[in-house]
Amino acid sequence: MAMTIHVDIVSAEGEIFSGVAEMVYAPAVMGEVGIAPRHTPLVTQLKPGEVRVDTGSGKDMQHFYVSGGILEIQPHVVTVLADTAIRAADLDEAAAQEAKRRAEEAMADRSAEFEYAKAQSELAEAVAQLRAIERIRKGKRG
Amino acid sequence: MAGAKEIRTQIGSIKNTSKITKAMEMVAASKMRKAQNRMAATRPYAEKMRKVIGHLFHAHPEYKHTFMIEREVKRVGYIIVSSDRGLCGGLNNNLFRKLVKELKEHRDAGTEVEFCTIGNKALGFFGRFGGNIVSQATHLGDMPHIEDLIGTVKVMLDAYAEGKIDRIYIAYNNFVNTMTQSPTFEQLVPIPSTMEEDLKHHWDYIYEPDSKEVLDNLLGRYVESLVYQAVVENGACEQSARMVAMKSASDNAKNLIDELQLIYNKARQAAITQEISEIVGGAAAV
């Protein structure tokens, strides 16, 4: 039997593929890489493209599209951490700016000091309300 | 009798409320199932990510990333995950209460705190008390996507990389089971190295294009995936907490209606008895 390597392709929103293969091809940023079993440990970024898994057994290759991500290779395990989002440095930066702006808007005309006493009293009030509801419920049942 | 009509309208309004709570309970139950599935779906990615990071700690990269280096703590950042909507029992309050306690400790120790809030409730709570919110995300909906979180998290990570924050925590509700959710705090960066240094074999990855770029990317994604998982888990918590809260509200309404019905019947009976005795009294007088 030919040597095989375990392949996991996952994205943040779900598992895509898990199984054994004789050969895996992935679109690394420096060019496509082919991974055979007992490859040396390697970590690289992926660019948008196709991951192909040759499961042997004479069947067709399995194709998976990834929009980028990270590829990790251990001698007997290949892990593809695929992105679900389209990533680019300036896109990320824009998103960060947007998040900051929203926060600043929400923060406007509010004091900068965290008021523990006030926070605690409000929490105590809410908790007391919850407890009262609990007690009423128990009283009704009992 | 005046009381009878009032009681009747009261019963009517409670019945209407219980219809709403019943409907919300059922909606939450079906959403909970979906949220739990989503939680299960994100698990493989997080596990694989953790494995890769674990390998990385065993390897000896020539480049030490800032996320892997502990430094003196002067300012800390909190990423707080909460729900967008209320009516889910004490879910958010329990988390905030535990957090406020911890924040107090930070203040007593002289460390400053910055917040990054996810969800309306955290924004409202920490906004009201004037904490320093550096970034926020709300209205993620039932199906949060990782791209909604990238920017929010990046603000924190950038602050860490620039040395403005020395440690980042995440606060969220951990889904134990349908009935139990436990408020949880975890340290995100510097990445806590629970793994012992394995000095037996000295090896390192090959990095393409170079270790700095790859590690920057990988560790950023690692933190994002942890935050995403926390958000998804918190979503499942929210739905199950709401389901339980609405169920108890429906039960309460039912009990209240039963009691009021009894009072109403008694009042009605009393009115009839009084009327009869008045008629009898009147007849006797004639």
Image (cartoon, coloured by chain):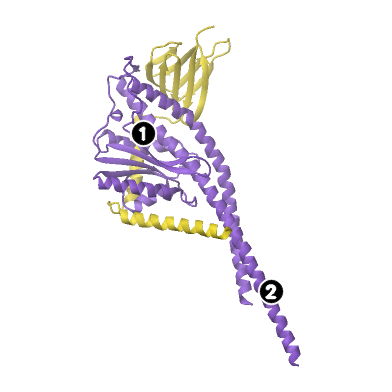
Is residue B137 toward the left or the right of residue B262 in the image? left
What residue is pinned by disc 2? Answer: B269
What residue is pinned by disc 1? Answer: A92
The quadrant of the rendering that contains the N terminus of chain A is top right
For the residue pair A135 and B79, the one nearer the viewer reads as A135
**Amino acid on which the number 1 mark rests in the picture:** Asp
Which chain is home to disc 1? Answer: A
Instruction: Pinpoint residue B69: horizontal percent, then vertical percent.
Output: 27, 29
Crowding around mark 1 (Cα neighbors within 10 Å: few <14, some 14 to 19, many 20+) is some
Instruction: Give chain B's shade.
Output: purple
Q: Residue at x 50, y 56 (%)?
A: A134
Is residue A54 toward the left or the right of residue B96 in the image? right
Farthest residue in the top direction?
A1
Q: Residue at x 74, y 92 (%)?
A: B285
Which chain is home to disc 2? Answer: B
For the residue pair B73 and B277, the one nearer the viewer reads as B277
Is residue A110 toward the left or the right of residue A7 in the image? left
Instruction: Pinpoint residue B54: horizontal percent, then vertical percent.
Output: 38, 24
**Amino acid on which the number 2 mark rests in the picture:** Gln
Instruction: Pinpoint residue B283: horizontal percent, then vertical percent.
Output: 76, 89
Instruction: Give chain A's shade.
Output: yellow
Label count reads 2
Farthest residue in the bottom direction?
B286
Q: Dot 1 lies on which element? A: helix
Q: Dot 2 lies on which element? A: helix
Residue B109, picture quadrant: top left
